[in-house]
Amino acid sequence: MNLGRAKTILIFAFIGLNLFLGYQLFWPDFGRLTQVAVTSEELAATEDALNENNYYLDTSLDRAVQTSGFLTVSPYWDSKDDIIKRFEDNASRIDETEDATFYHLPGINAVAHTSGLIHIFFDPGLFLGEELSDLDESDLKDLVEQFLSDEEILPGGALFDYLEREDDDVIVLYYKQMPKDKPIFAGQLKAVIQANYLQEVEIYWFEPLEQAPEREMEVIPANEALNNLVNTLGPSTEERSIKDIRLGYFSGEYDAEKWEIPPVWRIELDGKQHYYINAFTGNMEQEKIIPEKLPDEEDD
């Protein structure tokens, strides 16, 4: 008997058995992990449609199948109370309406809405430095965060999201929340700088309450979100660059104890405009309405 040949046969038999068992154990999960929601042909068709309407994809798309569910949130009352306490303790005057409370301090006016939104105005503003236009994004972010911390109005867990330079004088920094695996784009902090002064801060912070895994569903793929955006906006008269598209959560402003917010695809155009496509319905979600500024203070 040829022992070498027998050993070779046994080795290949053993390898074959392991491959068979591995297939039985892991192939179903492997298939799910590598399932593609967007084929190469579909991606190419989307890019053609974008280009025909003067939109150009300047980022990669996540082509895998993705799932998500609604996220239940409420205004983060503890965070709001911590921020408002300093205004309550030091206000020279407090005015109340059905929907908001107005705090008047030397150089600061704050509005606390019953919805949980806080708007703070600095007059004439907090001076940040002479040459803000020369700072890069990272240095400017660090500078603003230091001022917000000093003023005790930086919520815990705030993560820098993006920066907009609206013109030569106005710079707006946006912060987001990241409770788990997906960001909340609308539970945000916004800081407005004009002419080297921090002029106003808007805070709308959420407390994530629950997310039921059993209610997760497959979301529309990223290319479908892009198609829906172009169908909603229509052809562009000038070239538009799609800089980023990512999955997260978005909500308008509600005067409620708690509510569910849907997953969305956030699409960034030209590095400065953001649109939100509902990842279940494919419809565009509306930006929340910025509250009106303080009423004229005739008594001051």
Image: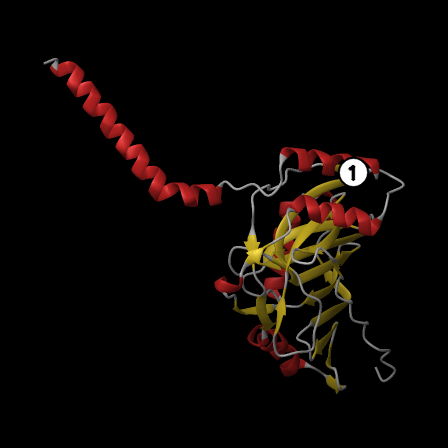
Looking at this view, is 176 or 180 the one in front?
180
Quarter of the image for the C terminus: give it: bottom right
Image label count: 1
Residue 88 locus on image (x, y percent): 65, 82
Residue 33 locus on image (x, y percent): 48, 43
Quarter of the image for the N terminus: give it: top left
What crowding class fits label 1: few (fewer than 14 Cα within 10 Å), some (14-19), or many (20 or more)?
Answer: some
- Residue at the extreme front of the image, as rendered: 1
Residue 172 as seen in the image, left or right of residue 184 = right
- Residue at the extreme right of the image, as rendered: 237
What residue lies at 70% left-to-right and 47% top-to-bottom? 224
Residue 207 locus on image (x, y percent): 56, 70
Instruction: Relative to 25, say whether 100 is above or below.
Output: below
Q: Quadrant of residue 9?
A: top left
Instruction: Relative to 282, say whether 206 is above or below.
Output: below
What residue lies at 48% left-to-right and 45% top-to-bottom? 32
Looking at this view, is 159 or 179 the one in front?
179
Tell me the residue that label 1 is attached to: 49
Instruction: Relative to 10, say whether 178 is above or below.
Output: below
Q: Quadrant of residue 295?
A: bottom right
